[in-house]
């Protein structure tokens, strides 16, 4: 199914013959940079229901991070722009003489923004602790039980099936957990000396009890950051290999945090102790639903995330993989009592199929596009973009969640100093041999949906990007101002 009418090179419409000829010339110039690469492209003038350019738009291609448009659009449609994650803290026990005779429960809901640097909320644990200090007439100064994280809403699988070992352990491949902490990232600071020597670790933030780094780095001149972390979920050990620029006094490299729920509880306990609240029990995480030992759980505090509109803006503008995967997993709860990646992806496919989008060739193994195993046709994403424009009450929020070409995010240098700078709301996607763009161009009274996917290119990425820029510019210009 296509929501637009197709006009290809030398198409049947006489009124577009001249435009089609110019488009083919632009494509010929573009192909000189493609070598053995494959390209799929579709651009539609949405108001007139006319697809002004179509190249193999029904051929499945690797999309990289433009996959996030499918995930964020689905989350927005299902949850609404004002949805907020609500992490709840409960008391299970009785309070007497400022002592809690029982446990403190943190019921996790998969909020990826807890303590996130994107929202400048690093001091959230102080608010949590203050709520406990103020509870009851005399407050709470002593907890005889445990602090328990109830993670039962999410399954224990932290990494999508499609992610590969070279990525896992690095900051951009941070795992998804029921309880997140500081973007699930750890910053490790190194000091390097002359080439050939081993960099030394001089700092780790945040401080994590029992966190260890197996250091296999080498200092080397002229490499900048050529380091790679590896490690598995629920482990507090990370191994770093590769090389860092020699003779630097303060070189920060980021890894993923292997166990955010545990680390958050450690930090929560430490903050409570700083407030003068002693904990006699332990901290523990549980994937089973917590049931009260007493009559019922007493609500103490609810920590709300920023609204979904802000979360998807961060996801798309900064191409945040962890945020995207958290959303993909959370929406599984529309079909199941426990969230998993597989269930979330099935919800995505079912949602769009019911809205007339042909998902026969939608192959999604993750919600972020980090895996090279995702494939779908450009026409599918184009149909989704047109649907959001025509039928969704969330279109404006979705549009403004996309980075603006020439202005910000991952497309801040794309189409810069061109007539489309500031007018193209486009998500980029790039992994090895893949360069993609998708979104909207809002120019005057016209709005275009755009999907460009290039796979298997060789040579320098900047040459491919420059060619895509020229192709988009020429296509729009020649459609709006055909030669006489």
Image (cartoon, rainbow, N blue to C red):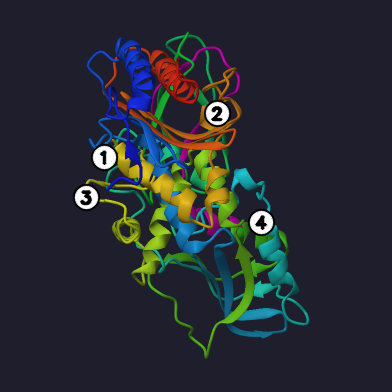
Q: Nearer the viewer, mark 3 or mark 4?
A: 3
Mark 3 in CB contact with mark 4 (< 8 angstroms): no
For the C terminus, the quadrant is: top left
Q: Could you tell me how far apart the alpha carbons at marks 2 and 1 are, in whole angstroms?
A: 25 Å
In the depicted structure, whether residue 35 falls above or below residue 108: above
Q: Nearer the viewer, mark 1 or mark 4?
A: 1
Q: Earlier in the sequence, mark 3 or mark 2?
A: 3
Which disc is residue 124 wearing? Answer: 4
Instruction: List x then y, in percent, for residue 14.
Output: 33, 26
Which disc is residue 375 wearing? Answer: 1
Between 253 and 363, the one lying in front of the other is 363
Is residue 238 something one can see in this rendering? Answer: no
Q: Is residue 286 left or right of residue 457?
A: right
Q: Could you tell me how far apart the alpha carbons at marks 1 and 3 are, in whole angstroms?
A: 11 Å
Q: Is residue 11 left or right of residue 313?
A: left
Q: Earlier in the sequence, mark 2 or mark 1?
A: 1
Q: Nearer the viewer, mark 2 or mark 1?
A: 2
Instruction: List x then y, in percent, for residue 3.
Output: 35, 46
Q: Could you tell me how far apart the alpha carbons at marks 3 and 2 are, in whole angstroms?
A: 31 Å
In the depicted structure, whether residue 98 falls above or below residue 391: below
Magenta residue span: 240-267
Q: Could you tell me how far apart the alpha carbons at marks 2 and 4 are, in whole angstroms?
A: 34 Å
The structure residue drawn at horizontal position 61% and vertical position 63%, both measured from the top left corner, is 304
The structure residue drawn at horizontal position 73% and vertical position 70%, both measured from the top left corner, is 133
Q: Is residue 192 left or right of residue 333?
A: right
Which disc is residue 405 wearing? Answer: 2
Q: Secondary structure at mark 2?
A: loop
Residue 259 falls within the magenta-colored stretch? yes
Instruction: List x then y, in percent, for residue 284.
Output: 46, 65
Residue, far right: 137
Is residue 234 something one can see in this rendering? Answer: yes
Q: Nearer the viewer, mark 2 or mark 4?
A: 2
């Amino acid at each position: 199914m296509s929501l637009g009418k197709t006009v290809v090179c030398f198409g049947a419409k006489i009124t577009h013959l001249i435009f089609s000829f110019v488009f083919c010339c632009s494509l010929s110039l573009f192909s000189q940079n493609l070598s053995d690469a494959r390209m799929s492209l579709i651009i539609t003038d949405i108001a007139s229901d006319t697809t002004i350019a179509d190249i193999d738009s029904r051929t499945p291609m690797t999309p990289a991070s433009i996959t996030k448009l499918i995930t964020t659009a689905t989350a927005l449609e299902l949850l609404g722009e004002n949805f907020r994650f609500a992490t709840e803290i409960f008391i299970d026990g009785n309070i007497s003489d400022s002592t809690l005779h029982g446990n403190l429960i943190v019921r996790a809901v998969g909020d990826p923004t807890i303590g996130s640097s994107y929202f400048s909320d690093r001091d959230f644990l102080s608010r949590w602790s203050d709520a406990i200090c103020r509870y009851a007439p005399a407050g709470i100064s002593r907890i005889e039980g445990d602090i328990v994280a109830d993670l039962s809403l999410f399954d224990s699988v932290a990494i999508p099936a499609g992610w590969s070992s070279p990525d896992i352990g690095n900051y951009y491949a941070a795992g998804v957990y029921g309880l997140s902490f500081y973007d699930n990232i750890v910053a490790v600071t190194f000091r390097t000396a002359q080439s050939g020597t081993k960099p030394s670790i001089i700092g780790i933030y945040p401080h994590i009890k029992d966190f260890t780094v197996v250091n296999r780095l080498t200092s080397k001149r002229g490499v900048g950051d050529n380091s790679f972390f590896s490690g598995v979920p629920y482990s507090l050990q990370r191994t770093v290999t590769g090389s860092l620029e020699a003779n630097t006094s303060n070189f920060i490299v980021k890894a993923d945090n292997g166990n955010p729920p545990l680390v958050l509880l450690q930090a929560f306990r430490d903050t409570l102790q700083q407030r003068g609240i002693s904990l006699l029990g332990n901290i523990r995480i549980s994937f089973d639903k917590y049931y009260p030992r007493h009559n019922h759980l007493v609500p103490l505090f609810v920590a709300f995330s920023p609204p979904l509109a802000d979360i998807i803006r961060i996801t798309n503008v900064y191409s945040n993989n962890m945020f995207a995967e958290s959303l993909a997993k959370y929406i599984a709860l529309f079909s199941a009592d426990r969230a998993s990646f597989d269930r979330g992806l099935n919800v995505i496919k079912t949602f769009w199929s019911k809205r007339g989008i042909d998902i026969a060739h939608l192959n999604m193994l993750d919600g972020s596009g980090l895996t090279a195993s995702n494939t779908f046709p450009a026409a599918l994403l184009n149909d989704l973009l047109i649907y959001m424009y025509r039928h969704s009450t969330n279109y404006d929020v979705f549009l403004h969640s996309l980075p603006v070409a020439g202005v910000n995010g991952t497309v801040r240098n794309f189409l810069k100093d061109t007539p489309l700078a500031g007018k193209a709301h486009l998500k980029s996607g790039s992994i090895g041999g893949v360069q993609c763009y998708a979104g909207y161009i809002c120019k005057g009274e016209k709005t275009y949906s755009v999907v460009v996917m290039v796979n298997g290119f060789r040579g320098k990425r900047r040459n491919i990007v420059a060619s895509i820029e020229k192709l988009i510019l020429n296509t729009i210009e020649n459609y709006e101002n055909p030669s006489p």
